Image (tube, rainbow, N blue to C red):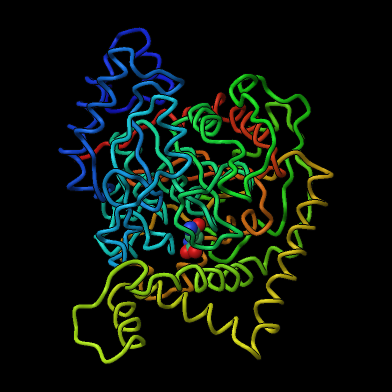
Amino acid sequence: MSNYYTIIGARNAIRQKKISAVELTRQTLGRIESTDKQVRAYNSTCADRALEQAKAVDEGRRAGELAGVPIAIKDNLCTTFGTTTCSSRMLKNFHSPYDATVIQKLESAGAVILGKTNMDEFAMGSSTENSAFGTTRNPWNVDCVPGGSSGGSAAALAAGMCCGSIGSDTGGSIRQPAALCGVVGLKPTYGRISRYGLVAFASSLDQIGPFGWTVSDAALLLKVMSGHDPKDSTSVPLPVPDYLAQIDQPIKGLRIGIAKEFELTAGMDPRVKSAVDEAMKLYQRLGAELVPVSLPHTEYGIAAYYVIAPCEASSNLARYDGIHYGHRTDKPVNDIIDLVSQSRAEGFGDEVKRRIMIGTYALSSGYYDAYYVRALKVRTLIKRDFDEAFKKCDVILSATAPTPAFTAGEKTADPLQMYLCDVFTVTCNIAGIAGISLPCGFTADPKPLPIGLQLLGPTFGEEMLLRAARMYESATDWHQRRPVLG
Ligand code: GLN
């Protein structure tokens, strides 16, 4: 089915001339036309440009590992084409003067960029309901959310409106929507991929990463996007392995860490728990050893994250003043303070304002030590927990999210409930390690909802992490299911 080409499937079909890049791009744009009314995954598309790119592939003027593959981009990655809105009124008309490094890399690999995907405003949220431009829905059940903040990228893929997509993950924003949409999502190690051109949310936590239907698709996108970039001083000058070279080789004697702190009982959906338990058993049957590990500071992860991330956000978002950047009020103003406050009041949504207030409060004199410094101390402890655990195991297994996709509107009135969607994902960002989510089951609903399995690996352990994930994937068929859209 053309709707559901994987990245590698599409690439091979184009190489073997079973389909032309233009045909595939047309089909995918057609799918967006017919389906995105229900899903609302895209903020904008660039159809003409995409068809030009595809034509160049067909005419041999563009080549590379992704030649002709239609890809969707989260709307917080700067592109010289179209707008880069971060799903915020603040940046509604923002045209970036430059392309993010990942955009350049994807395009030099021959990818066809279809458009920019919806997200929670400035990547703050877990449901894509914080977008200023309408909420994205879950293709498995359009009454439900796709997760967030990269919900548009996950939903576009799950609905067949691209073959792969790009998101960003600050506390779970790739892995959690991947879990809720039944696709694979990878958060690479901090420093693996250049963030030049990613609109900053929380700079010590943000990473860019891929979505794909399969672990191999995620590995290919990772390979294309990784590497040192002089324009991002946090990108690491390490060679980029060929993540696909060994991916099909099972790891002999794989040691899987099981942390009791991830076996949350309150708030854990029993269907998620049983799917994850089954995954553990399957790994054992595949020859892996389950090793108990301890991550004692996990319970402070959410609290530390929701101090550190808002603190950094309050600083990063200070630039949107209606003068240097972003929305400027039309109302009459008395002075510059009035201009800035009125523009910010109009430009930002509620969740963004909440984070700015939390962040400025926690950074203010008298509270700095009590909140920010303390959160950083917890951060060190969480990092040490992982360092210790990875002495005993290769990867750590847990659920990605405590529940399957929830109904739209269910958690919007209670920010804390929304924050708890990230209990299993935030510590990975706090420690800067790598994490992946892959499908591990479905609920028994009339419209089954996907369940995600999370594997965490040590810093720059992506090669092994992907192989470990592929071991599970190759023994299951969850990744072959596709939603039926009405
Ligand atoms: N849901 C988390 C938050 O709201 C994580 C977001 C993200 O990873 N960008 O901050």
> Where does the image place residue 147, in percent across and percent down from the top left?
40, 54
Q: Is residue 331 above or below residue 164?
A: below
Please indicate whether residue 130 sits to the left or right of residue 418 in the image: left
Please indicate whether residue 75 sits to the left or right of residue 367 in the image: left
> Where does the image place residue 74, in percent across and percent down from the top left?
38, 48
> Where does the image place residue 303, in percent across and percent down from the top left?
61, 72
Considering depth in this image, is 189 or 452 the residue closer to the camera? 189
Considering depth in this image, is 33 or 356 the residue closer to the camera? 356
Quarter assignment of residue 23: top left
Whether residue 60 appears in this view of the structure is yes
Q: Is residue 208 above or below residue 213?
A: below
- At 68% across and 39% down in the image, what residue appears? 237
Q: Quadrant of the N terminus?
A: top left
- At 45% across and 70% down in the image, what residue appears? 317
Q: Is residue 401 above or below residue 371?
A: above
Q: Is residue 286 above or below residue 203?
A: above
Considering depth in this image, is 425 or 257 the residue closer to the camera? 425
Whether residue 421 appears in this view of the structure is no
- At 32% across and 73% down in the image, what residue appears? 322
> Where does the image place residue 204, in percent across and percent down from the top left?
61, 60
Please indicate whether residue 297 sits to the left or right of residue 208 in the image: right
Quarter assignment of residue 275: top right
Quarter assignment of residue 246: top right
Count of marks placed on residues: 0
- At 65% across and 36% down in the image, what residue appears? 462
Q: Quadrant of the C terminus?
A: top left
